[in-house]
Amino acid sequence: MAVLTYRKTKTTVTDREQIAKALADIGIGFETWGVERLPEHLRSRNLADTEKQDVLTAFKPELERMKSQGGYVTADVVSLWPDTPNLDVMLAKFDKKHLHTEDEVRFCVQGRGVFTVFPQGTDALDIELRPGDFISVPANYHHEFRLCDDRKITAIRLFRDPAGWVAHYVN
């Protein structure tokens, strides 16, 4: 289950409904889909390409709903682990404040990662995603992303145009 932390006060929220409401209030979508339907071997290690397809199949109803609601045309699975080649270089692209011209839509299958979001007119929030958590950060929303200390995450990503999804850095 996700953990929402208000950076200024260090207040944390772990109740899923409270997290969803707090994020909705600042324009970010959040849901919990769970991962119970996945076999354990798809929840405990870096996945091969064939296993990534099994993950997409397991969440097909949710993905189809998101595609219909958000206009997304494709989904894939990214799996980052400590032994991923060039992991530090890859992560350095997203651990600074940036935005995308497309929504950043993620479902955490395994591992953990933190989105720090910078809503206009209020303090920054850290959203630690854990297995089963879904988030949709709208296009042009200032944010950062980093892995937790274990440096492991497998996530489903949804795109309208994957070729156009690049980080634009902001101050």
Image (cartoon, grey):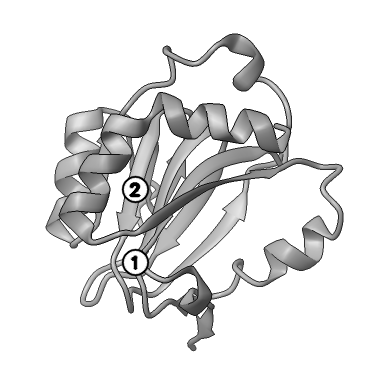
Residue under label 2: 135
- Which structural element holds mark 2? strand
Q: Residue at x 80, y 61 (%)?
A: 88
Q: Position of residue 41 (x, y in %)?
A: 66, 14
Cα separation, mark 2 vs mark 1, equals 10 Å
Query: Which is more foreground, mark 2 or mark 1?
Result: 1
In the orientation shown, which residue stands out farthest toward the bottom? Answer: 171
Residue 151 visible from this viewpoint: yes
Q: Nearer the viewer, residue 132 or 20?
A: 132
Q: Is residue 171 above or below residue 52?
A: below
Q: Nearer the viewer, residue 25 or 52?
A: 52
The mark nearer the N terminus, 2 or 1, is: 1
Instruction: Give me the disc on residue 103.
Output: 1
Q: Position of residue 125 (x, y in %)?
A: 36, 57
Q: Position of residue 118 (x, y in %)?
A: 35, 70
Q: Residue at x 60, y 68 (%)?
A: 94
Q: Residue at x 79, y 56 (%)?
A: 87
Report the quarter where the N terminus lies. Answer: top left
Q: Relative to 72, is 10 on the left or the right?
A: right
Q: Relative to 42, is 81 on the left or the right?
A: right
Amino acid type at image mark 2: Ile
Amino acid type at image mark 1: Asp
